[in-house]
Amino acid sequence: MDPTHRGPDEFGHDSNGSAQDAGRRRPSRDPLTPDFGQQTPQQARVVPLISGDLLLTINPVDGSEVEPCRPGERPAEPVRRTPAERADRERSAAPPVPPGPPVLQLPLLERDDERERLVRLLARGRSVRLTGPAGSGRTALLDAVAADCAQLAPDGVVRLSGHKRTVTDLLHGLFDAVHDAPLHRPDRALLLAKLRATGAVVVLDDLEFGGAALDELLDATPECAFLLAATPDVTAPGPDSHLEEVFLAGLDGEASVALMERVVERPLAEEENNWAGDLWFESEGLPLRFVQAGALLRQRDLLRADPTAYDEYGYLDSRPAEAPLPAEALELPLPSLGEGAAPAALLASRLSEAARDTLRFAVALGGEVPHQAHLPALVGDTHADAALGELAGCGLLSPAGPRYRLAAGVLAQLEAAGYGDDATGRARTAAQHYAWWAGHPSVTPARAVAEADAILAAMTQLVPGDGAGQTSVAVLLARSASPAFAAGLHWSAWEKSLRIGQEAARIAGEVAEEAYFHHELGVLALCTGNPDRARAELETSISMRGALADKPGAVAGRRALALVEDLSGAQAAGGVPLNDEIPAGRFEASSPGGPTAGIPVTMPRSYADETAVLPRQTAAKGAGSGADGRFSVLGGARRNLVAAGAGVLLAGVLGTVVTLGLTSNSDAQDDPAAPTEQSVSEDDGSQNEPPADETTDDAVPPAPAPSSTSSTPGPTGSTAAPTGSGSPSPDTSAPQDTPSPSGKPSSEEPSPSHSTSKSPKPTKSDPPPTTPSTSPPPASETPPPTESETDGPGLPDSSDSASGPSGVTSADASAVPSESASVA
């Protein structure tokens, strides 16, 4: 097309008006295939939530921001969930049903006495601790008891998992199960207040703590009855906990054989029955061992059967069951007693390749099995999600909250069989997958929290790593997952991911990411009520980001640090509201009787109209007043340090002033050609006064103010102009337009201290130190005051000059009538 002559295809640029047509331009059609070259950048997931009295905004880009919650933004009062809402939540929190053939539901054998006793104790409001070895069937018994106690408490039955959970996690989990408070994490006071009024039967599996921590959990929920399941190696509860102890033993020989027959789905042969008896002595009757042994027999039956009689999913086809078995299948022996006691390796060898790869990933993640939705991406097989059903049917998995993990003892058996040889490589693969998945905008924080254990296990496996590539992957995963954990209110996982990411970033040398993790740790400490740790983390983050010239991140850190200082100041003042407190900043202090001290302080909006420069008496009174004084925070060791420094500086300045003044006066007196003309004001009352150059002990000047950038109002209302040097000079200063007694400006009057002849140069001395205070005129230029001026009641005790109260100001001297003026 010719660029000079426009054609009709130039939509929006014709003569009929480009503005109207350009606004109605048709949007382009979406392409049939995605454009991999120009992809739309993913939007950052910013989630605001309430933590106590603070508004926390999760920002995964520059760092989370925290500010006081305004009255209009406070969340509503948490309400209790209805029974239907509790049932929906319990179904969503249960482990997913594995795909493929349905898993066999096994009966609860020889547990009727324990079941009735537990229900009876919980109905009386007593808390019980169920202790049994791993694999004794504690989870199955808890499920049965929870079903029997559904109508005992007003808030129903709450199922919680104690696997890798702290007391704080369980308290917040119980609050979330009973109350509906989205994006609201209550503070300690509100949490305890709501839990004291909660009445529920809490079924807690896989408890991992005892002692004082367990006492804290029980004391916080006095109206709840707990059914706690733990292994014998867990710390026992305190003597004041008043828990009922129920020990769960193994099954007897007859029940163990019956359980194995239910798994195999046929009666056992005589040889198999004897093998089961030997296994009972070896395993002490643990139900898990017989479930796994039954799976071994079922696999043996499948291997002895005709392979053509089953389809690819393991179902029998239309071939009659009377078909003869192959000769090699009939010779398959029973597993040995050692293989029956530790059957994980043998069971895994007879599973599909996808199931074995899933076990390798579980071993690499420390026993945590990824969700079935992640298995196709990790394994590389579109049907890998069916592997979860194979593993669950063999007794190699056990439920843990909303997920699965390897059953007791399976991890050690698989590691001995060589399934953990490539653990680091598979952990890195899982970390890369989770880093992409956790940072995707379509993934909700609740789904990320459900995979928290697997994600943390992947990060832990990579730190400390052998190379920078592994730690960089851990940094990427922590950077993607930690905001999701924070938004999902799983703050223990948030803290763990931040600390692992900070360590990985330090090892990898990624300073920007390390600064981000320090910032997030500071925000977390601030929200959990630890201001000292928050200050340390935020100061570290600000210094790192300042070195990297990261302005947005540094601004976010300074805002959080300012809030930390405000909250710390309010606590130190005994609960004074933030709007009524003025935190101490850099200030200027002076000794009592000194000149005016300028105190620039940080003031809230309510004090913005007040001046920051206070009179001497007001500053001294505020600094020495009690806790009720507005400037009481200015007193203390810091002010004493400033006063001591000012005294040292004063000694140097005073010595220089006296030396220069004596040198100048002695030179003028020794010169025979020097004139002796003086004004009338010098002759009147100077006979009984000491010379202006000499100072006495009673006239020691106060400490000068450290800051000299601004002028300070004097006692008489005048303002001393700052000079370039902190010490007086023997030369004549610049003329000023101060009115004189003759009616002319002082610049036109002859100076009484200067003669027509040239005076010798003063003695050379070291340059005086620079002082921030204003420099007075030389001592030879200042006329001595009269008796009426020095004894007058209207003059203050101090002077604005650095040489002490040696006379009156220029304005007061000009007001005294001189003899020359009267003669004129």
Image (cartoon, grey):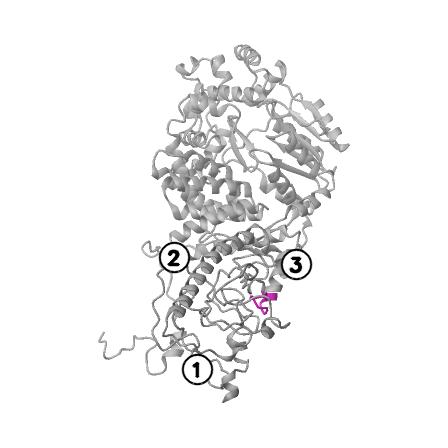
Q: Is residue 43 visible?
A: no
Q: Which mark is nearer the camera, 3 or 1?
A: 1
Which residue was labeled with disc 1? 749
Q: Is residue 415 above or below residue 25?
A: above
Image coordinates of residue 737 in percent, x first then y, are 45, 81
Q: Looking at the image, which residue is at 43% across and 57% down?
A: 552
In this rendered view, identify the residue nearer to me: 39 or 34: 39
Image coordinates of residue 460 in percent, x first then y, are 45, 35
Q: Are marks 3 and 1 in contact (CB under 8 Å)?
A: no
Image coordinates of residue 774 in percent, x first then y, are 47, 67
Q: Is residue 205 visible?
A: yes
- Splitting the image into 4 quarters, where does residue 192 fall? top right
Distance from the alpha carbon under mark 3 to that under mark 1: 50 Å
Distance from the alpha carbon under mark 3 to that under mark 2: 58 Å
Task: Look at label 2 and name its amino acid.
Answer: Thr
Task: Look at label 1 and name its amino acid.
Answer: Glu
Q: Mark 3: which secondary structure?
A: loop
Q: Mark 2: which secondary structure?
A: loop
Tell me which segment is drawn in magenta: 605-615
Instruction: Tell which circle, 3 or 1, labels the residue nearer the N-terminal end.
Output: 3
Instruction: Tell which circle, 1 or 2, labels the residue nearer the N-terminal end.
Output: 2
- Is residue 317 in the magenta section? no
Task: Look at label 3 and name its amino acid.
Answer: Gly
In this rendered view, identify the residue nearer to me: 819 or 75: 819
Disc 1: CA contacts within 10 A as few (<14), some (14-19) or many (>=20): some
Which residue was labeled with disc 2? 40
Disc 3: CA contacts within 10 A as few (<14), some (14-19) or many (>=20): few
Label disc, if present, on residue 629 of the rendered structure: 3
- Looking at this view, name the residue that lies furthest to the right: 124
Instruction: Tell which circle, 3 or 2, labels the residue nearer the N-terminal end.
Output: 2
